[in-house]
Amino acid sequence: LKARLEAEGLFDTARKRPLPLQPRGIGLVTSLGAAALHDVVTALRRRVPHIPVVLVPAQVQGGVAPASIIAALSKLYLLAQAGQAPGADLAKNLPIDVILLVRGGGSIEDLWAFNDEHLARTIVQSPVPLISGVGHETDFTIADFCADLRAPTPTAAAELVSQPRDVWL
């Protein structure tokens, strides 16, 4: 699967987009019960408490996880596109300039949902840059290769999109 998707160009660095320096809003997909959620929210609150975060929960492990993640990403894609439309009413449509797809570490079986072909194709369709922060530093999934950027951990994913407030001040 990896070789086929690579041959189709899903991993090409030329299609990967840079991250926004100051996102107006951050989309987040993870499980409500995941430690990754706590880690990401803590990092974002500490570094950029002024940037709104839109959480769309998904199951990130097990047989239904790929479909759940795809559904969550699809919701964020619609929100991101609505916020980017010419003349968009930003009071009604929170702009989402980047999406974090995160899940903490585990066995390869725990992370297997992120090796799904349909999920890979959904990730490359993102209307905004998408960061994959799945597993720990040594874990790699197909989602990582399809994302605009791979973060070694969920916390690192949050840090990549959040220049600390004191840096900007």
Image (spheres, helix red, strand yellow):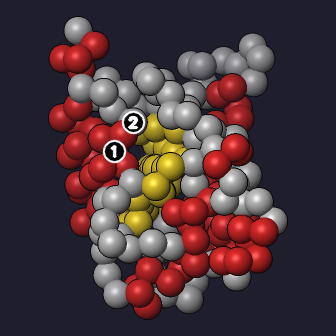
Amino acid type of the residue tagged 2 in the rendering: Val
How far across and down, in percent of the image, does residue 88 sit? 70, 19
- Give the SS element for disc 1: helix
Which quarter of the figure is the C terminus placed in? top left
Which quarter of the figure is the N terminus placed in? bottom right
Q: Is residue 49 above or below residue 133?
A: above
Tell me the tag on residue 158.
1
How far across and down, in percent of the image, does residue 146 sit? 62, 60
Q: Which residue is mark 2?
A: 161
Observer-nearest residue: 149 or 37? 149
Q: Is residue 17 above or below residue 37?
A: above
Res. 79 visible in picture: no
Relative placement, left or right, of 29 versus 43 is: right
Res. 22 visible in picture: yes
How far across and down, in percent of the image, does residue 160 sit? 36, 40
Q: CA distance from mark 2 to mark 1?
A: 6 Å
Residue at 23% from the left image edge and 43% from the top image edge: 43
